[in-house]
Image (cartoon, grey):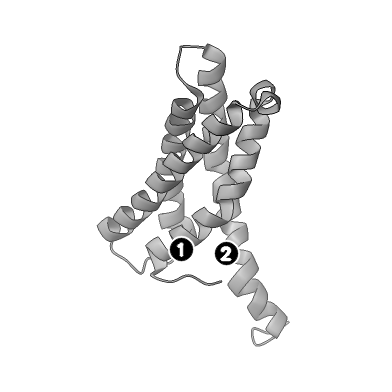
Amino acid sequence: MSADNPRSEFLNKYILPKLKFGMGSIVSTTLDYAIFFGLLWADIGLEIGVIQGIALSTSIAMNFTIQRNLIFRKERGFFSAMGWSLSFSLISVILSGFFAQWLYAIPFFNENPLAIKVLITAVFFLFNFYTKQFSFEKKVSL
């Protein structure tokens, strides 16, 4: 298959970047889940929205390092990329914390906090991919 092949171009432009992003996300999501459930099960009196914020914030720091060094091209300087990335991450932390708190009030989700995490992870995957692509590469490839 040559590089000029439309299928190859499609894979390289749309599929492979998301697969690489997904692999990096697996690493940081594992950390996120470990902290989330560790704090939840420790029962130290924190609201679930706060627990979500702590877990996600720690995961975001790891994810930034992975994304900057292994996934996206460095079209912005370090501080510019970090500023954009952290701004979008802050939006993600706030929205996901409110989302977790709202879902936790629903009896099914109150009894199944794993469902909260899985749903939030799925909803924010594409949001995070495109905002991070913009943060590092100054573009969004839809």
Pointer 2 and pointer 1: residues touching (CB < 8 Å)? yes
Task: Give the side of residue 41 with respect to residue 53, left or right.
Answer: right
Question: Does residue 141 sit above or below 42 in this rendering?
Answer: below
Task: Give the side of residue 87 with respect to residue 32, left or right.
Answer: left
Tell me the tag on residue 18: none
Question: Does residue 85 sit above or below 53 in this rendering?
Answer: below
Secondary structure type for disc 1: helix
- Give the quarter of the image for residue 105: top right
Residue found farthest to the left: 79
- Give the quarter of the image for residue 103: top right
Check disc 1 and report the residue beneath it.
Answer: 133
Query: What residue lies at 64% left-to-right and 83% top-to-bottom?
Result: 3
In which quadrant will I find the C terminus? bottom right
Q: Position of residue 137 (x, y in %)?
A: 41, 68
Query: What residue lies at 57% left-to-right and 51% top-to-bottom?
Result: 125
- Bin the neighbour count of mark 2 within 10 Å (Cα to Cα): few under 14, some 14-19, many 20 and up: some
Instruction: Name the residue nearer the viewer: 38 or 90.
Output: 90
Query: What residue lies at 65% left-to-right and 88% top-to-bottom?
Result: 4
Q: Position of residue 51 (x, y in %)?
A: 47, 26
Instruction: Name the residue nearer the viewer: 66 or 45.
Output: 45
Residue found farthest to the bottom: 4
- Bin the neighbour count of mark 1 within 10 Å (Cα to Cα): few under 14, some 14-19, many 20 and up: many
Q: Position of residue 75 (x, y in %)?
A: 35, 69
What is the CA distance from the residue labelled 2 to the residue labelled 1?
10 Å
User: What's under tag 1, amino acid-wise?
Assistant: Gln
Query: What residue lies at 63% left-to-right and 47% top-to-bottom?
Result: 122
User: What's under tag 2, amino acid-wise?
Assistant: Pro
Check disc 2 and report the residue beneath it.
Answer: 17
Disc 2 versus disc 1: nearer the observer:
1
N-terminal of the pair, mark 2 or mark 1, is 2
Q: Position of residue 48 (x, y in %)?
A: 51, 24
